[in-house]
């Protein structure tokens, strides 16, 4: 994966003095394909290239015993300048998949270039995928881009979450919104090419202050969750989602274009209240789509 054509990256094209873009260890890739075999979902194909690693699918969810649960591991100390990472997921007909990460994603301080995490999801008929990585922590002067390209059948469900912190706020004062760029672009379409929606989040704290009302205000953590699901599930989920200020976090939900699902957003001063709101939303989605509960929170599984 080479350069990303986004205007916010135009001034960050210089090469790192350490390891240049494209050198060994700078391009991480993970490709996973899931299919149904003998009544449960299996990880049928797996390709991995350091620093991204998946060992195997596990079946730790007692409420959905046929669900393949996968933990993405990074063998590096975080995301560094010049990294180009990609994760591609194919979930075939009627599969049940849960994907998470072993910890938060730490985007290290940068003095050159930028880092990219590109992910694609292809969901077949009746597939159900939960993508719930740990939170993202952008360090001072970092530039981090996440792109998500989704192809989803009308009968499938994808729950995708990202929780982004303001930085290492308890480390030192200039780490709070001290990063240069956080950019997140999500696009979704049907298998026939019909476009569903596009959403882009662009935060450049050094160019445009974000402490004013209508942006982050006094809050330091935001959660952005998308669920693409059939209309009957979306309406049932929306009817149950609590909104407003709850236990230290503001949250709200709205419909996505074309009756393709919902978007759910959360703001909080600290990570934990935001994580709890996202977890509550996840619980509602799981109950309405699969008729099964989520398990108890496990501190060693990031936000879960």
Image (tube, rainbow, N blue to C red):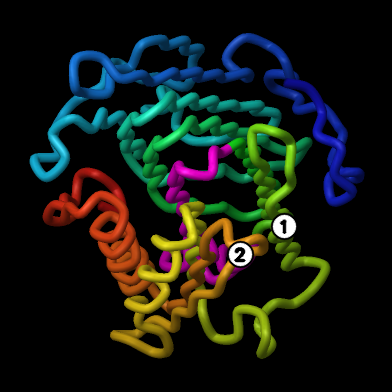
Identify which residue is drawn at 32% across, 77% down.
240
Check disc 2 and report its element: helix, strand or loop. Answer: loop
Q: Measured from the top left, where is residue 163 in percent x and y?
A: 46, 58
- Crowding at dot 1, Cα within 10 Å, few <14 / some 14-19 / many 20+, comes out as few
Q: Which mark is residue 200?
A: 1
Disc on the earlier residue, 2 or 1: 1
Nearer-the-camera pick, 126 or 182: 126
Q: Which residue is mark 2?
A: 256
Identify which residue is drawn at 71% across, 63% down.
203
Q: Measured from the top left, where is residue 88 in percent x and y?
A: 54, 25
Check disc 1 and report its element: helix, strand or loop. Answer: strand
The magenta region covers 152-178
Q: Is residue 19 left or right of residue 86?
A: right
Q: Is residue 209 left or right of residue 296?
A: right
Distance between the alpha carbons at the discs numbered 2 and 1 = 14 Å
- Name the quadrant containing residue 209: bottom right
Magenta span contains residue 36: no
- Name the quadrant containing residue 93: top left
Q: Nearer the viewer, mark 2 or mark 1?
A: 2
Identify which residue is drawn at 43% across, 70% down.
235
Q: Measured from the top left, where is residue 253 in percent x and y?
A: 49, 75
Q: Which mark is residue 80?
A: none
Nearer-the-camera pick, 181 or 294: 294
For the residues labelled 2 and 1, say whether their Cβ atoms are less than 8 Å apart: no
Q: Can residue 144 be seen?
A: no
- Name the quadrant containing residue 149: top right
Magenta span contains residue 174: yes
Q: Is residue 230 above or below residue 13?
A: below
Identify which residue is drawn at 77% across, 37% down.
112
Nearer-the-camera pick, 288 or 175: 288
Q: Measured from the top left, where is residue 144 in percent x and y?
A: 66, 45
């Amino acid at each position: 994966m080479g350069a990303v054509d986004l205007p916010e990256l135009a001034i960050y094209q210089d090469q790192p003095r350490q390891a240049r873009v494209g050198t060994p260890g700078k391009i991480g890739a993970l490709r996973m394909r899931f299919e149904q075999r003998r009544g449960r979902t299996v990880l049928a194909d797996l390709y991995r290239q350091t620093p991204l690693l998946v060992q195997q699918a596990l079946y730790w969810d007692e409420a959905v015993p046929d669900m393949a649960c996968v933990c993405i591991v990074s063998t590096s100390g975080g995301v560094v300048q010049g990294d180009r990472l990609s994760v591609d997921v194919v979930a075939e007909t009627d599969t049940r998949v849960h994907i998470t990460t072993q910890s938060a994603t730490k985007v290290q301080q940068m003095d050159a270039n930028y880092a990219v995490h590109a992910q694609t999801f292809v969901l077949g008929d009746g597939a159900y995928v939960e993508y719930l990585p740990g939170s993202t922590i952008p360090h001072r002067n970092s530039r981090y881009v996440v792109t998500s390209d989704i192809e989803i059948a009308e009968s499938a469900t994808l729950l995708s979450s990202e929780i982004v912190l303001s930085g290492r706020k308890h480390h030192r004062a200039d780490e709070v919104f001290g990063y240069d760029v956080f950019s997140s672009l999500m696009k979704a379409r049907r298998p026939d090419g019909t476009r569903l929606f596009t959403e882009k989040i662009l935060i450049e704290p050094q160019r445009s202050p974000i402490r004013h009302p209508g942006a982050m205000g006094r809050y330091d953590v935001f959660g952005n969750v998308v669920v693409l699901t059939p209309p009957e599930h979306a309406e049932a989920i929306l009817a149950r989602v609590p909104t407003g200020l709850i236990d230290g976090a503001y949250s709200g939900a709205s419909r996505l274009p074309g009756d393709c699902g919902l978007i759910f957003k959360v703001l909080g001063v600290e990570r934990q209240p935001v994580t709890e709101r996202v977890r509550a939303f996840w619980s509602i989605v799981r109950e309405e789509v699969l008729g099964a509960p989520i398990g108890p929170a496990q501190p060693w599984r990031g936000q879960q």
